[in-house]
Image (cartoon, rainbow, N blue to C red):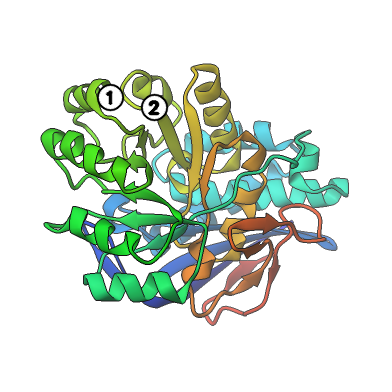
Amino acid sequence: MQLILRPYELKLQHTFRISREARDIQPTLVVELKNGDFSGYGEATSNPYYGATIEKMSSDLMALETFIIEHSNLNPEDFWQTMYPHLKDNMFALCALDLAFNDLFARKKGMKLYEYWGFTIENNPITDYTIGIDTIDKMVAKLKEKPWPLYKIKLGTKEDIKIIEELRKHTDAVFRIDANCGWTVDETIMNAIALKKLGVEFLEQPLKADDWEGQREVFLNSVLPIIADESCQVEADVVKCHNHFHGVNVKLVKCGGLTAAKRMLIEARELGMKTMVGCMTESSVGISAIAHLLPLLDYVDMDGALLLSNDIAKGVIIKEGAISYSDLNGTGVTLTQSSPMERTRI
């Protein structure tokens, strides 16, 4: 088996702003595991908030190259458990590796990944489309540019309610709000009252990730459901979020990939919580992997590739929120662009 690492720089259609950062280019790392005629692909983006860099992911994976190849005969669950002790301090790298291994494993079985898992796709949720923080006029323009039945709106400004009031004038679509840790307890409780009247479905991570006392107060007093994001990174966080949030938004890069995410979603459902998976502005490599978890989800945010001006792969197709799978097995991904910085050894 070959381990091939391909760094890319993904260009966004618009500057993407949330409450704590803005970017025009998203660095990402695509991992390919090649075994004979079969290849599996995985992806993880860089992220300064979580200290994830392309250089660190690449170096940690290349250092494990021989170990990875020696354990390539395992099933995905055992493979994840074997790799975890070596990559537990770099979950983004573990994610990219896990996605590639799941993809390769299912392709060799001649099955789509959701088929290997025994899932049916009749009741899959649709994905929202994200409007990043900008001037009100520009946010309205972005909304008009992309007519969609369901939007995620990034907030965390001094004009949050005004923004939603203005956007509401231009669409009847359902809104979801993501404050990315940008609000206080009182702001959240008061904003929820106004936002519910404006057709908002839920609020995502309004408080700082470690404000558990504040989050409990919000949980008990908010008129809108609250979904954890930054507060729910790894498997141990799911039970912590119970009775503090109404649901969890699992990110593949934070928890170490599809294998861990599937366990987290199943646990959340057993606890009676709503389930969601979100993206990190990945290409169609990462987005196509998310699609195979849809049968476990109440909500999904997998619009990352739609925000790009240079998607580097083909996989799932998204039209007005509805997701169609590729005809290919595994996660259904094909790379469409080469990387000038590819690293590979046999």
Of the pair 296 and 322, the residue shown nearer to us: 322
Residue sitting at x 60%, y 37%: 259
Label 2–label 1 contact, CB within 8 A: yes
Q: Quadrant of the C terminus?
A: bottom right
Report whether 235 appears left or right of 4.
Answer: left
Point out residue 105 in the picture as x, y percentages from the top left corner.
Answer: 77, 46
> Which image quadrant is residue 119 in?
top right
Q: Position of residue 86 (x, y in %)?
A: 49, 39
Res. 66 visible in picture:
no
Q: Residues within 10 Å of mark 2 (few under 14, many from 20)?
A: many
At label 2, the amino acid type is His
Residue 195 % position (x, y): 27, 45
Residue at left 68%, top 61%? Answer: 316
Q: Quadrant of the N terminus?
A: bottom right
Q: Would you name the residue on which mark 1 appears?
A: 219
Q: Residues within 10 Å of mark 1 (few under 14, many from 20)?
A: many
The label shown at residue 60 is none
Mark 1 or mark 2, which is nearer the start of the sequence? Answer: 1
Provide the secondary structure element on which disc 2 rests.
loop
Disc 2 target residue: 246
- Whole-percent x, y for residue 286 in the image: 57, 57
Work out which residue is located at the far right of the displayed protein and give it: 110
Secondary structure of the residue carrying numbered label 1: helix
**In this picture, is 307 found above or below 212?**
below
Count every numbered label the image shows and give the total.
2
The residue lying at 31 percent from left, 41 percent from top is 196
- Residue sitting at 45 percent across and 76 percent down? 145
Please state if 79 lies on the left or on the right of 272 as rendered: right
Q: Is residue 290 left or right of residue 50?
A: right
Amino acid under label 1? Answer: Phe
